[in-house]
Each structure stands twice: as C-alpha cells, then as structure tokens.
Amino acid sequence: MTFINIFLLGMLIVCALAVSLTRNLLTSLIVYMAYSLIMAIIWMLLESPDLAITEAAVGAGITSVLFFVTLKKIHAIKGDSDHEQTQK
Amino acid sequence: MSKRRSDWQSRPQNRVRQWFHNGFLALDDEIINQVTKETLRMDSDSEMDKHQEMLDSHRHERTLALERLDQYNIQAWANTRGRKALSRIYVTISFVLAFVMIFFLLRTVATMPRFSDPNAPTNNEVMARYIEKGLEETGAVNIVAGMILDYRAFDTLGESTVLFIAASAVLILLRIDRRKDGTPVQELIAAESDDRHYEPRSDRILQGSAKVLVPIIFLFGIYIMLNGHLSPGGGFSGGSIVSAGLILYLDSFGFEKAGKFFTYKTFSWVSFLSLSFYAIAKTYSFYCGANGLPSGIPLGTPGAILSSGLILPLNIAVGLVVACTMYIFYALFRKGGL
C-alpha cells in the first residue's frame, strides 16, 4: 500500500514537472490529463470516492477537452499532415 | 557630474551625432538662405507667398526628419538593450515571487498538524455531529451528500450560481450572433469553415463508438445524479459526466443534430428553472429550520431511492445546471455558438 502511494506521488511530481517543461503543447496537455487521472486514483486511496469521480470527469475529461479546442483554435495542433497525405 | 557630462560630450559617437545633426541644420539653413535670397529678388507679392510656402514646407520636412530619427533611435534601443533589461527585470521578479511563495507554503506545511491526528483542530464537535447525527437529521446514507446539500446547501447554491455566471460571461465574450434578418455575419462563416476543416463530420469509427458509448455515459451520469444520497457522487459529478456524453455526441454527429434538442432556449430555461427551484426550496427549508417549524418534508427510510427529503431534487437541479454549463462552454469554445 505504501509502495503504491509513494509510486503515485512520485508520478504526480514527474507529471507536474513534465507539463511545465515539455515544449509541445499537445504533449503537455496529455501529460496534464495523466496528472488528473493519477490524482483521481490518489483520492480513491484516500477514501474519498466523491472527489475521485469529480476529478476524473472534470479534471481529466472536460478541462482537457476545452484545452484541446482552444489549442485547435490558435492552430497549436497541426492537423494538416494527415490532410496532405490523403490528398496525395 | 560636470566632468562626466563633458566626457560624454567629447566621446566620439556623440561627436558623430552632433556632426550629423549640425549637418542637417546647416543644410537646412543653406536652403532657407538661398530661398530668401531668391525671394528678395522677387518683386510681386504672389511670388513672395509662394516662396514663403516653400520655406514652410522645408521647415516642416526638417522637423519630420528629426522626429523620425528620434523614433528610430527609441526603437533601436527598445529592440536591443531595452528588451534585454526588461527581460532581466521580469526574470528577477518571477524568481523572487516563486521563492517567496515556496517559502511561505513550506512554512505552512511545516506547522500543519499530522495527517489523521485526532488532536488536530479540524477534528472538532462539528465533524462529530455530522458523523453521529447526519443520517438521522438528513436521511442521506452518503454523509458527503448530506453535508453539501443539507448542512451546507448555501455553499452549493453559490457554486451553481458561479458556474451559471461563468457560462453567461463566456456566452457574452465568445458568441457570434447572426444579423437581424437572419443572414450570417462574416465571422460566423469563417468559424464554420474553420470548424469543418478540422472536424470531419462523417468519421465512421467515431460515430460507431459514440453510438455505443453515449447511452452508457448518459445512464452512468444519471445514475450518479439520482443516487447521490445513497452512494458516492452527486449532482456535480453526475452533471459533468452527462455533459461529457453530450460533448461526445456533438463531436461525432455535428452541430445540426445536437441543435435539435439543445438550443440557447434550452440552456437558459433549464438553468433558470433549476437555480430558482434550488433557491426557493432551500429558502423554505432554511426559514422553517431557523424558526423551529416543522418543514413537512418527509425524510423517508434511509437507503431507499425516494428518501432524505430535499437532497434528491437538489442533486437533480445541480446536475442539470452543471451539464448545461459544461456543454455550452464546449460549444462556444469550438464555434462561438450552438
């Protein structure tokens, strides 16, 4: 049990550092989603399933989806390579 | 001070600058002298006026050129040394702020009581009361639901209102309206073409998996919403799960199909009715509780689905507000409208 806790907390720190240190915005966003999922598991281990459900739905789901849409709007996600390949 | 000033004036680059400026002025003076000489030779007044105009235009050009030179100098400074100095200031300030924050946070953590310490100040009689009498007073098996929707229902009303206000603010900022006669404005056309470029409508894998997943997500969200007083969950988490299902539906089937059952009217009516129902119901129960009157709301048998008084309808109201708000956030972020 303590091993799992220590592992999850370590992953949390790694994810938090990776979010701020990665250059690619899409990558950092996916790492951010992973951060939220790990946080949900930690809430579960801390015996608060209410928070775990909310964290998984809002933190990993809706916030990330809103971020994805925003990145698309500012053209930070390059979706053109697929288009070009299919056109060729 | 005066020595430094004289030093500065005798420096070669300054001398070059002075020479440059003086050259400018000397040239201009020469032109002016020439023009005045020419005007002296003129006899008629009209010619005089003409030359006066020429003189004025020369002066004007001179001041313009000087202004341009100043602007150029300022820009050059801002692009090289100014930018460097500014970035250095920014970096210093951000480092200082970060370290101050880290220091205060670490100090706070160091003085906090240990986790699950029985003598911690959070373990007081309020908590004991919630645990011992929560089931009896609220009728909710899930103590958390009893706390946030009964003992502390006023907080939850504030949270739902904050969400509604945030959705309204996003609506004001991001919505692209049509013209009064119904024709789309240029920005709407641009947004739609941009959206179509990025969102393939006929993605069969996405549509097939959405057909399977969306009903299950809806069922799970509604289950969490309705069972909030019996099991973990509640209005907020159930509502966000339902809105995730709505977003998946919108993504896979497009705005036209989603617009058939969800419009601005749906959003405003559902949010308004839920929030006002919440406010009226809680006002009634607070009024009764504060005056020691029996509220007349049956608590039911703990564990049954129709129990715990107001918590079940309040959960539904909160869930509806949250689902509508999250969905409209997504639609506005993506296309600026429904």
Image: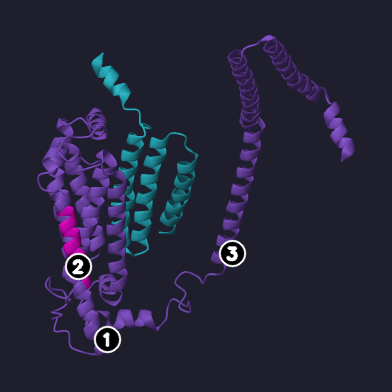
Chain colours: A cyan, B purple
Residue span colored magenta? B266-279
SS under mark 1: helix
For the stretch drawn in magenta, what is the main secondary structure?
Answer: helix
Q: Position of residue B145 (x, y in %)?
A: 26, 70
Q: Is residue B272 magenta?
A: yes
Frontmost residue, B59 versus B178: B59
| Label 1 close to label 3 by CB (< 8 Å) | no
**B50 or A32: which is nearer to us?**
B50
How far apart are the alpha carbons under marks 1 and 3?
A: 41 Å
Quarter occupied by the N terminus of chain B: top right
Q: Where's residue B153, x and y in %?
A: 28, 73
Q: Is residue B278 left or right of residue A74?
A: left
Q: Give the CA separation, mark 2 to mark 1.
A: 21 Å
Residue annotated with mark 1: B290
Q: How many marks?
A: 3
Residue for badge 3: B107
Where is mark 2, residue-wise?
A: B276
Is B326 positioned to the left or the right of B116 in the image? left
Closer to us: mark 1 or mark 3? 1
Which residue extends farthest front? B44
Mark 1 or mark 3, earlier in chain: 3
Residue under the image location 28 percent in, 63 percent down: B161
Q: Chain of mark 3?
A: B
Q: Residue B109 in the image: state x and y as whole percent.
A: 54, 65
What's the residue type where badge 2 is placed?
Ser
Classify the position of the C terminus of chain B by image quarter: top left
